[in-house]
Amino acid sequence: MWCIGTLTEEYRCRMYNLLKLYAKPLRCDEPVICIDEKSLQLIAHSRAPLPMAPSAPTRQDYEYVRRGTTNLFVAVEPKAGQRVVSVTDHRGKTDFVGFVQGLLTNTYAAARRVHLVLDNLNIHFRKCFDDVLGKRAAGKLLRRVRFHYTPKHASWLNMAEIEIGILTRQCLKRRLASRQLLKQEVATSQTDRNALRRTIEWKFTRQDADQKLGRHYVSKLTW
């Protein structure tokens, strides 16, 4: 199902800002990091699957057992081929703030400035850091951070969605019965892709946007 947003002046400004950011060359001291999350349902087999045999794939019963839900936070630096994935019990503002705090104090501790690309989920805003850490601690943590938000109804501009899609195809499109198993699968994928420096090549430019979407732009002037 499509959700088509109105291409207002705000939409265009946010889109242009991200496309300009993506067009910049890689700088180790000023990383561009895209962040998103994915909720998952843990599912176990109700009966043991039948193992693979000559001329027959693995077979599993259509019934399954629900084992609760969990969440993935995914951060990817597209041009550097670096990603960090964290499995959490919940997707609240405390979990999100803790994830970003880990990125800034560990993976990107040496960066002079950090650009974070996010969608408009309510836990993604500066206020959540103030609420969780307090204004003084939040200000100290975020002094190097520049927030960049996708237009509303335009999360396709966040490259973390591409990384989540790859992760899903690699190891999430099957039954995972426990958080421990999920963590193992995610850690293996993260380690392998980081070792190979799997980058994301973004080719959609401002010129492409104007050519493909220009007829849908809404003028600042209203009558």
Image: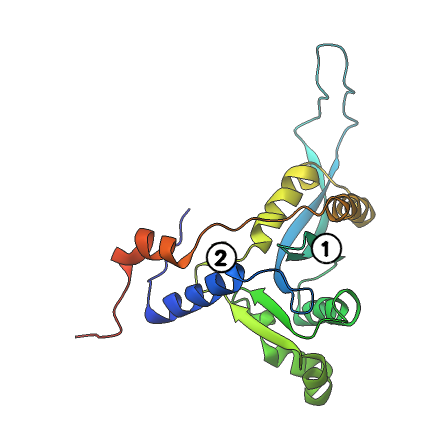
Number of the label disc, if any, that sits on residue 85:
1
The answer to whether one can see residue 56 in this image is: yes
> Which quadrant would residue 220 be assigned to in this image?
bottom left
Q: Mark 1 or mark 2, which has the lower sequence index?
A: 1
Q: Amino acid at mark 1?
A: Val
Residue at x 68%, y 85% (from the top left corner): 139
> Which quadrant would residue 61 be assigned to in this image?
top right
Q: Nearer the viewer, mark 1 or mark 2?
A: 2
How much space separates mark 1 and mark 2, taking CA atoms? Answer: 19 Å
Counting from the top left corner in percent of width and height, residue 82 is at: 70, 54
Q: Amino acid at mark 2?
A: Leu
Q: Is residue 79 above or below residue 136?
A: above
Q: Is residue 181 above or below residue 70?
A: above
- State which quarter of the image contains the C terminus: bottom left
Counting from the top left corner in percent of width and height, residue 196 is at: 74, 44
State the SS at label 1: strand
